[in-house]
Image (cartoon, rainbow, N blue to C red):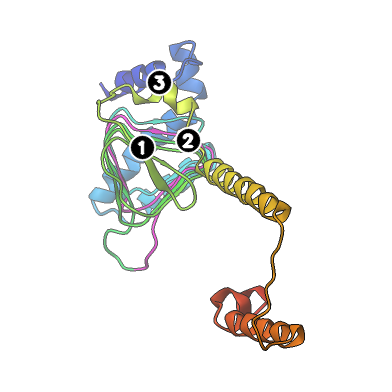
Amino acid sequence: MRLAEDIRTIREQDPAARGTLEILLCYPGLHVLWMYRIAHRLWRLGVPVLPRWVSHVARFLTGIEIHPGARIGRKVFIDHGMGVVIGETAQVGDGCVIYQGVTLGGTSLHKGKRHPTIEACVVIGAGASVMGNIVIGRESRIGAGSVVVKSAPPRSTIVGVPGRIVGEREVSQPDLAREPEMDHMPDTTAKTITALHGHVQELARQLAELRQRPVLVTTPEGLTEAEVAHAFRAMSASAGDGDPNAVFLEGAGI
């Protein structure tokens, strides 16, 4: 029975769930799935308007919008759920976990498949957006706030804006939502800033060493110091003209 399966799924995925009555009364992710199934069946039967109206009422009651044309698998858990949007041609596989603010959206105006396909056992963090007709492989994890616009292979870890694959697990993890690594998603921005800081520190050290060395200036025979200075200025000017960054740094193109 689907109702018993839905309740069991919430018990397995949410340690805050304290009892069956609480789950039945206080979990909007559960309520919206019930109403989605009604709307989806009406949609497949070709009933006009009514499926969208059921979806609209579900959004009003739960804060979660699932288009009746979307395909949602079994044992899907929408935790909290406020602000979740799942588009018409989106597909969500069995055992997925979706947190609040997630968008499974489209990036084109054509009538065909334009929303993502989320394979089984994928965890999508709060506020993440998965956009376009892409495929996220099974057992992948998408970090909170990420914007994913490219497909990813199974068991990927995706973070950032735009989303980048920062790791792939070789071992299957069926109980993905409870992995301790979900609390330690890599911060690619922090790693980049740390690397740049290290390079700046090294350059500063090298510059300090160069400043401590004596500067030896030799004047070619037959040239005065004024002529050497003039030639040096001319060389610097010509080098600046060929520097592609020089114009940008002066403000052009910004």
From the top left corner, tell me how far across and down residue 6 is, in percent: 34, 23
Q: Which residue is mark 1?
A: 167
Q: Is residue 96 magenta?
A: yes
Spatial separation of the CA atoms under disc 3 and disc 1: 18 Å
Tag shown at residue 186: 2
| In this rendering, position of residue 231 left or right of residue 25 | right
Label 2 packing within 10 angstroms: few (<14), some (14-19), many (20+): some
Q: Is residue 38 magenta?
A: no
**Quadrant where the N terminus lies?**
top left
Q: What segment carries the magenta color?
A: 82-109
Q: Earlier in the sequence, mark 2 or mark 3?
A: 3
Q: Earlier in the sequence, mark 2 or mark 1?
A: 1
Marks 2 and 3: which is nearer the front? 2
For the image, the number of numbered tags is 3
From the top left corner, tell me how far across and down residue 177 is, in percent: 39, 25
Q: Which residue is mark 3?
A: 178
Relative to 28, does residue 102 appear above or below in the rendering?
Answer: below
Marks 3 and 1: which is nearer the front? 1
Residue nearer the viewer, 243 or 72: 243
From the top left corner, tell me how far across and down residue 227 is, in percent: 72, 88
